[in-house]
Image (spheres, helix red, strand yellow):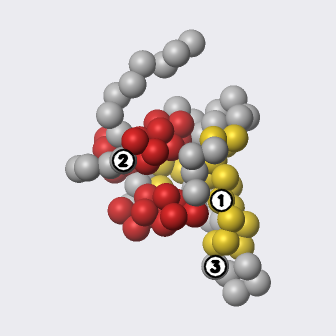
Amino acid sequence: MNISKHEQRVLHALAQGGAIHFERLPSGKVHEVFCVTRDGHVLADCTLALFDRLKKRGFVKSRHGQPYRATRAGITAVRAQLDNR
């Protein structure tokens, strides 16, 4: 499946244990998102449009009101990358 470089970057951070935190409007619609890596850094590439694409494809999911995390489909869709540690 074709995914953009920004989608790959966000999915890779999520696959390593990161999460997408969100804020909702009173109507319940998500209006602001930010991706936090497992180290606590905020990923600047995660925008609302990118989040909508990932959610529409089923790559991220929230359970019980928790932050969005990568699904099994999201983890398998991202290309393997070396961890630069």
Marking on residue 33:
1
Of residue 3 and residue 68, the one placed in the foreground of this image is 3
Measure the alpha-carbon separation of dots 3 and 2: 25 Å
Q: Secondary structure at mark 1?
A: strand
Q: Is residue 80 left or right of residue 47?
A: left
- Mark 2 vs 1: CB contact within 8 A: no
Report crowding for label 1: few under 14, some 14 to 19, many 20 or more residues within 10 A (C-alpha). Answer: some
Asked whether, in this view, residue 56 is left or right of residue 42, the answer is left
Q: Amino acid at mark 1?
A: Val
Q: Residue furthest right?
A: 26
Q: Residue at x 64, y 79 (%)?
A: 29
Residue that label 2 marks:
4
Residue at coordinates 32% horizontally, 49% vertically from top-left?
3
Q: Give the residue displayed 76% in from the left and 84% down from the top.
A: 26
Which residue, given by chain and number where applicable, does mark 3 sit on?
Answer: 29
Across and down, in percent, residue 59 comes to: 41, 55
CA–CA distance between discs 1 and 3? Answer: 11 Å
Mark 2: few/some/many CA within 10 Å (<14, 14-19, 20+):
few
Viewer can see residue 72: no
Instruction: Give the structural element (helix, strand or loop) at label 2.
Output: loop
Quick check: 82 above or below 15?
A: above
Does residue 51 sit above or below 85 in this rendering? Answer: below
Q: Earlier in the sequence, mark 2 or mark 1?
A: 2
Position in image of residue 23 (x %, y %): 73, 66
